[in-house]
Image: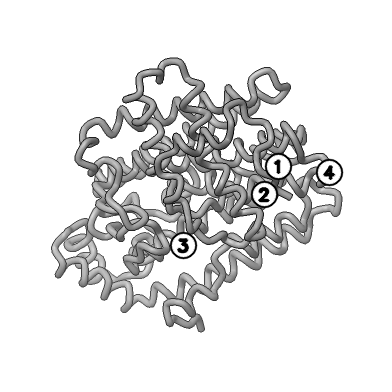
């Protein structure tokens, strides 16, 4: 259903020639399966055009050096990533509208909005990598570690955030839903920053009495869960003029737990230090993060095990890291994960089945998101782990 841009002010060929890294987008990251491969590839091809159009239209970026900088920030921070949230935004818009409606200006707005949703995550990742001292992201150095970035990384991130708002203004100013879009994006930035704050403070305080499941889920929802599940769907509802109390209530009810479990899944993959799955090398143990694994371990360990945890957690010493890993194994944390994951999945299915057939979004939409996005227990097979 996706069509390539048909209404771009600057000719497409010229824009592509200006996008220096255009060919680096291919082969595009594999779709998560929410959209068809054809639609996903068309969306990928639109990305350099959105970036270039945005760069060219901002007056303050007229100096070539600034245009090059902004273009590079946007490209570097989004290349090589799976655009799961963009897919969700597009799917929701297409489900809520008749296929024949999505054309022309609306088609462009759908694609731009979906990419802006993903750029919010790219911005958060730049900040997160700086705060965590991360080394790599998506198989390449983090932005702040590039030779010509360094202590300019925070300013680059701030410019990038403003760039997102500029693109929204270019494409939605004057529309009836422009204010709602701005409010939603501001809510997304603030929610993620609140999550970043509590995440960082919890690590800094190193008070393991604070490693409770209630606090963990609060951090997980704000830092990742809201963006990963609710934000893209809410953005599509605004574009469809179906953003109301009933649709928001359904999204809160269904997608909150899915978003939190997405962060729990990230914690699991960090444990396996799997850059291909998480996009960065694992460091949760070393940095002393309040993760689901750590909280679950503290809930179940005896006095001796707790002392070992407190002595070793948050250390970069390989021996201490291995002792924490061994403690997780001794406590059978991974099997606990798969059992709880399945229980959460089944509880979410029941919530979906309880929705009326005319609910917005529809029960079928929520089930599609659950099946395509939610990491079910089959993930255990890929790690050669079986749940009992």
Judged left or right of residue 120, residue 144 is: left
Mark 4 or 2 closer to N-term? 4
- Residue bearing the label numbered 1: 249
* Mark identifier at residue 100: 4
Mark 3 or 4 closer to N-term? 4
Between the residue at mark 3 and the residue at mark 2, the CA separation in whole angstroms equals 20 Å
Q: Where's residue 227, x and y in %?
A: 53, 44
Between the residue at mark 4 and the residue at mark 1, the CA separation in whole angstroms equals 28 Å
Mark 3 or 2 closer to N-term? 2
Number of the front mark, 3 or 2: 3
- Residue bearing the label numbered 3: 265
Other-residue count near label 1 (Cα within 10 Å), few / some / many at <14 / 14–19 / ≥20: few
Q: Residue at x 81, y 48 (%)?
A: 359
Mark 3 or 1 closer to N-term? 1
Q: Where's residue 49, x and y in %?
A: 54, 37
Whether label 4 touches label 2, CB < 8 Å:
no
Q: Residue at x 29, y 47 (%)?
A: 142
Q: Where's residue 27, x and y in %?
A: 48, 58
Whether label 1 touches label 2, CB < 8 Å:
yes
- Residue bearing the label numbered 2: 253
Whether label 3 touches label 4, CB < 8 Å:
no
* Mark identifier at residue 209: none
Whether label 3 touches label 1, CB < 8 Å:
no
């Amino acid at each position: 259903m996706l069509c390539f841009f048909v209404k771009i002010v600057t000719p497409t060929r010229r824009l592509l020639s200006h996008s220096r890294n255009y060919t680096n987008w291919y082969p595009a990251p594999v779709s998560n399966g929410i959209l068809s491969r054809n639609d996903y590839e068309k969306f990928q091809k639109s990305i350099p055009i959105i970036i270039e159009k945005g760069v060219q239209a901002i007056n303050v970026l007229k100096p070539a050096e600034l245009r090059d900088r902004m273009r590079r920030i946007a490209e570097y921070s989004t290349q090589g990533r799976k655009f799961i949230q963009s897919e969700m935004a597009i799917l929701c818009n297409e489900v809520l509208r008749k296929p024949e409606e999505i054309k022309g200006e609306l088609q462009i707005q759908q694609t731009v909005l979906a990419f802006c949703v993903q750029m919010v995550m790219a911005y958060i990742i730049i900040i997160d990598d700086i705060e965590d001292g991360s080394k790599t992201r998506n198989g390449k150095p983090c932005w702040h570690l590039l030779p010509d970035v360094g202590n300019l990384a925070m300013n680059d991130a701030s410019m990038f955030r403003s760039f997102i708002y500029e693109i929204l203004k270019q494409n939605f100013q004057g529309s009836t839903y422009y204010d709602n879009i701005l409010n939603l994006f501001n809510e997304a930035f603030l929610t993620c920053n609140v999550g970043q704050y509590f995440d960082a403070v919890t690590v800094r305080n190193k008070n393991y009495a604070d490693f409770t499941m209630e606090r963990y889920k609060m951090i997980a929802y704000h830092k990742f869960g809201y963006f990963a599940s609710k934000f893209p769907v809410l953005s599509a509802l605004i574009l469809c003029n179906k953003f109301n109390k009933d649709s928001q209530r359904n999204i809160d009810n269904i997608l909150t737990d899915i978003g939190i479990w997405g962060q729990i899944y990230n914690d699991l993959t960090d444990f396996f230090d799997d850059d291909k799955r998480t996009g960065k090398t694992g460091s949760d143990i070393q940095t002393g993060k309040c993760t689901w694994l750590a909280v679950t371990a503290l809930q179940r360990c005896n006095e001796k095990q707790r002392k070992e945890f407190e002595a070793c957690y948050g250390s970069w010493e390989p021996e201490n890291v291995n002792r924490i890993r061994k403690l997780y194994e001794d406590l059978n944390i991974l099997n606990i994960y798969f059992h709880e994951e399945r229980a959460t999945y089944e509880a979410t299915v029941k919530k979906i089945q309880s929705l009326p057939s005319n609910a917005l979004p529809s029960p079928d939409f929520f089930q599609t998101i659950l099946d395509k996005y939610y990491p079910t227990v089959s993930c255990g097979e890929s790690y050669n782990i079986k749940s009992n």
